[in-house]
Amino acid sequence: MQRITRTVFEHNNSEKISLLNQYKSLLLLLKSHLTDRTFSILATPKLIDNNKYIGWYTNLEGQPVLLDSIANESHKNQIAKTLQTRINDIEQAVKLMILSDEDQRLISFWLPRIKSLGNQIYVINEDPVIINAFEEPVMPAPAPVIVPKPFWRWWHFLLLALLLLGLSSFLWYLFYPFDKERAVAPQQPAPVISSSVETKQVEPKTEPVVEPQDLLPTSEPAPIVTSEPKPETVPVPEPAPKVKNPPNCITKEEMNKDPNPSKMAIVFDNSLSMTVTLNESPSEVEQYFQYLTYGYRNMSEQERIQYEKRMTRLPTRLSSSKSVATSSIDKIQPNIDISLVTLTNCPAAYVSPFYNYANRGTLKRKIKKLTPTAAGGGGTPLYNGLEKASKMLDGVKRDDYILIISDGEDNCTKNNICTLANYIATQKPRLKINIVDIAGEHKIDCIANATGGKVYIAQSPKDMIKQMNKAVSNLKINRPVCQ
């Protein structure tokens, strides 16, 4: 994998860190649903140089060239067309994916940013690659839509005007009296009627006026009784019930006042041995590993298939570890950032950035999607994972923590992991390491013993929940927030 370029990164900007983590989650979500050629347009970001820069990497081979530096317009247009085709392929693939609401929101948020004009586009052997700017998407302005006016729209007004003009001319011709004089009948004056009969004026009869007091009885008037208004009673609100907080809760003020809160790394075993069921005894599991190493001896093909199904049936070490780890993350205090160190195959472990409280959903999705692989022969690079995890943490000026979830020892190197644990304890005396041992073979107890931690044995689904809760509780980073 080669680096295309590097861009300045504001590592103290929580919003930028959140965007970077979301983009990595997007790449993880899309990768299994896209062809290698389509996925290659999305460069992979990695923090470098003490987190001051983002290095952008790709599996494509060749010399990267900025698209804007290509002088040949025809060539540039062809690259832009290829880029658009592959973005269309991504959008078509997304429509066929079965997504949770959270994944749908993630993709809906990032698709406009992938298509943003603010991104740098590099070209490697005719293949475009997007360097995401992590800025608000800049989309091309939509072309103005010009609606052609129909030909008849102005003609029908002209025709209507001509029609009205013709109609009015016809009516004028039909009803106007050219030579006729309109006959007007003489008006007769109204007859005057005179009468010698004197009209007798009749005076109107006057009714006696009845005063209102005459209608009342002659007894004394009833006294008017006025009642004094009663004072309004204002309801007194009941006092709010007091919240009873647990004695070990942490207040928001306490979290805000801590300028250098603890951090944590989860070292998670994702090797092939974790696919073994938890419903078989340790002796049966050991026998299964013997068969895997030295062959199935006299078993028939059908017997071998049935035996493997029995030994890998749910719940497995991996499925139970995922379930318990994701539920334990919810119990860890909000002010503690968490990193994930994954042990998948030799020679090295994969280390994620730290996830803050707002991005714990991304961390849990990452754990749920872990899948062992036989690439490179598999293996458990525990030594390398512990070394990387310890380097990420302080352990000197503050209390930091590592939680190891594994079913065995390192099989990628001959270096002594107990020596490494003693060295870590000397250099970082405030770094504490707890172990959840799924195999129960006590092969890596020295790591916890050297750093003041503890080992918790979990060989059944119930044990997994119980021992994981103990391991987190012992680290004293699961204090609930006071209400």
Image: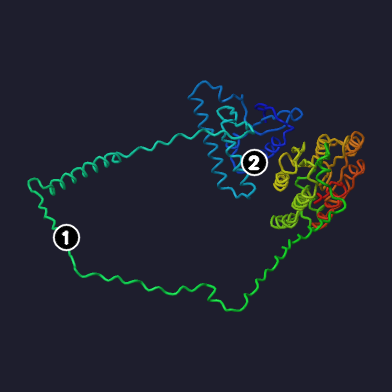
**Residue 1 shown left or right of residue 168 in the figure:** right
What residue is pinned by disc 2?
A: 26
Q: Amino acid at mark 2?
A: Leu
- Please, what secondary structure does the residue beneath circle 2 have? helix
Q: Quadrant of residue 230?
A: bottom right
Q: Quadrant of the N terminus?
A: top right
What residue is pinned by disc 1?
A: 190
**Residue 367 shown left or right of residue 146 in the figure:** right
Q: Nearer the viewer, residue 188 or 466?
A: 188
Residue extending farthest left: 179
Residue extending farthest top: 71
**Residue 182 shown left or right of residue 458 in the figure:** left
> What is the image's colouring?
rainbow
- Is residue 291 visible in the rendered structure shown here? no
Expressed as whole percent of the image width and height from the top left, the position of residue 174 reads: 13, 48
Q: Nearer the viewer, residue 279 or 97?
A: 97
Q: Amino acid at mark 1?
A: Ala
Classify 76 as above or below 422: above
- Please, what secondary structure does the residue beneath circle 1 have? loop
Expressed as whole percent of the image width and height from the top left, the position of residue 389 reads: 81, 38
Classify 71 as above or below 134: above
- Is residue 217 visible in the rendered structure shown here? yes
Classify 175 as above or below 54: below
Q: Nearer the viewer, residue 337 or 443?
A: 337
Q: Residue at x 50, y 25 (%)?
A: 75
Expressed as whole percent of the image width and height from the top left, the position of residue 96 reads: 56, 48
